[in-house]
Image (cartoon, rainbow, N blue to C red):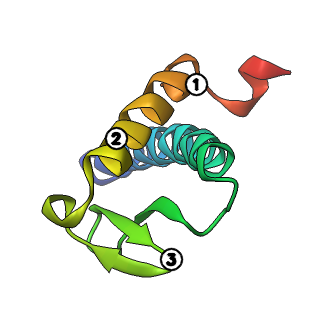
């Protein structure tokens, strides 16, 4: 096998691993946001979303805010939601079916 084909195979493997990790992260974030919507009884009150540069943003009523601008209650709600989403960490959708 040529070196070019070997490098391509390695690149494809790493790309698939990155896609799997992103998928698992999105599953956990979906569950985290679901818990937040139950805590506040509103899906848009407080949520976490991925940003185009690969970071996560905190959104209050659809507007991005910094962590320092959140109330203690909002920070606690995020921590509680994270606790509720822990069983979904690093799991695929197939795991739960």
Classify the position of the C terminus by image quarter. Answer: top right
Q: Residue at x 62, y 40 (%)?
A: 35
Identify the mark nearer the N-term, 1 or 2.
2
Farthest right residue?
97
Identify the mark nearer the N-term, 2 or 3.
2
Q: Quadrant of residue 82?
A: top left
Element at label 2: helix
Farthest left residue?
68
* Residue nearer the viewer, 9 or 5: 9
Residue highlighted by disc 1: 88
Residue highlighted by disc 2: 10
Residue highlighted by disc 3: 61
Identify the mark nearer the N-term, 3 or 1.
3
Q: Are marks 3 and 1 in contact (CB under 8 Å)?
A: no
Neighbor class of circle 2 (other Cα within 10 Å; few <14, some 14-19, many 20+) is few
Disc 1 vs disc 2: which is toward the camera? 1
The picture places residue 28, in percent across and down from the top left corner, at 54, 37
In the image, which disc is placed on residue 48? Answer: none
The picture places residue 34, in percent across and down from the top left corner, at 66, 46
């Amino acid at each position: 096998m040529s070196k070019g084909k070997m490098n391509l195979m390695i690149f494809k493997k790493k790309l698939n691993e990155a896609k799997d990790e992103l998928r698992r992260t999105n599953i956990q974030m979906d569950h985290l946001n679901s818990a937040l919507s139950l805590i506040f009884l509103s899906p848009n009150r407080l949520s976490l979303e991925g940003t185009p540069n690969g970071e996560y943003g905190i959104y209050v009523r659809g507007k991005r805010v910094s962590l320092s601008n959140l109330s203690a209650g909002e920070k606690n709600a995020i921590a509680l939601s994270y606790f509720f989403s822990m069983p979904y960490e690093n799991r695929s959708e197939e795991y739960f079916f």
